[in-house]
Amino acid sequence: MAPRRGGGGGGGSRISAPSCPGAFSYTTDIIFFAGDVAFFVLFFAVFITGLRMRKRARSGKKLIGFPYFLSIFCLVVAFCFSWISRLLQECQVGSHDGVYYWQIAIDIFSGVGNWLLLFVVVWTLNKILREHLGYHSTVSTIIFMALLVFMGLLTAARIVLGSYNSWAYTIISPDSYTSMLWEAAEKLCIVYWVFYLSSTIVSLSFSLSAIASMKSKHLDGAVSHSYFDGDAKTDLLQRLLGWVIGLLITMVLWIIFVIVSVASDLTGFIDSWITAVVVSYVGNLLQTFTFVVLFIIAKKADWSHDAHDDQDTPSYLAAQPNVAYTPGAAQFQPYVSVPQPQYTNFHAAPQPQLYDYSQKSVYTYDACVHNGLPHAR
């Protein structure tokens, strides 16, 4: 979501700020300002924590890479601009038109941030799943690309239309308010978030289908990978299935709260400022959880193949020198130029062949503008 543009007065008693006379005259003003600050701090905390703990995610770093952190950064900036603009407006610093210029910046950053979050869920997550679970589908790749391009165009249209409305309000007389495209922008917002929700459901359905399919094939013994054999792969698939379901739930819920808020702006079915606050706060909180769940998937799913290789290598082999041994063949010892002893096999079964670490394969994978919050009128 994004910072909610609070309405005017009403609701609560008047409160005076000594350092800024007349500021935050109503309880609603304080609550919306506090919400902007609180979610600015919360998203910023997620951003910093993710940067500090990203190295522990091993190969899951690809999931919480540049698009992930840029998405959070854009939302942090949007909330920062929101509480700054609200504070300046309450303290009557700058011109009245300045509020709408701040709103343009907020719309741009929140729009880009939300699209990047969709990119991580639709493209990055599914790309990593396909690579690490061995599930490759050209059809799904085309679908994901089409969804992202389409949503990118809708995002651009939403930002342009919303920015035009904010800019036009600063140069057009309020009497000409109806000549602007506010209603069109709000309708576009609803269309945008409905498609955003649909894209999320389609993408995560593909993710769940891929995981469930691989889990079924693994249990049937149809699929075998040396670094994921046995209980290790079963546990991995089970964890992935649970966390992706959790991601789907959080994503769907916060988008629904956005749609409810946007629809309310258009139809007015939410007539209580308390309800509007609850919808705004819960939606923003659920979006924060979405970023947290993505981080958990990257960190807890244990995408690292090397970790499984190390676990599957017997300790007594790891202690041997880097020499290949073949029963009945001469051993090569580069530091001793003497005839090599012959080894006799006293057992019926052949001697095990030691692992040649010089030939070890290394597995490496690369793996409205409105956000449900009332805009300035």
Image: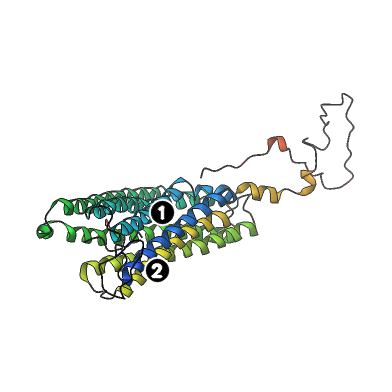
Q: Residue at x 58, y 48 (%)?
A: 55
Which one is nearer the viewer's eye here, 128 or 271?
Answer: 271
Which one is nearer the viewer's eye here, 288 or 345?
Answer: 288
The residue where tag 1 is placed is 76
Q: Residue at x 26, y 67 (%)?
A: 7
> What residue type is disc 2 on?
Val
Q: Residue at x 14, y 56 (%)?
A: 180
The residue where tag 2 is placed is 282
Report the disc number at residue 263.
none
Which one is nearer the viewer's eye here, 138 or 343?
Answer: 138
Horizontally, is 115 left or right of 224 in the view?
Answer: left
Decide: few, some or many residues near mark 1? Use Cα within 10 Å; few <14, some 14-19, many ≥20. Answer: many
> What residue type is disc 1 on?
Val
What is the CA distance from the residue labelled 2 to the residue labelled 1?
A: 17 Å
Quadrant including the N terminus: bottom left
Q: Position of residue 88 (x, y in %)?
A: 31, 56
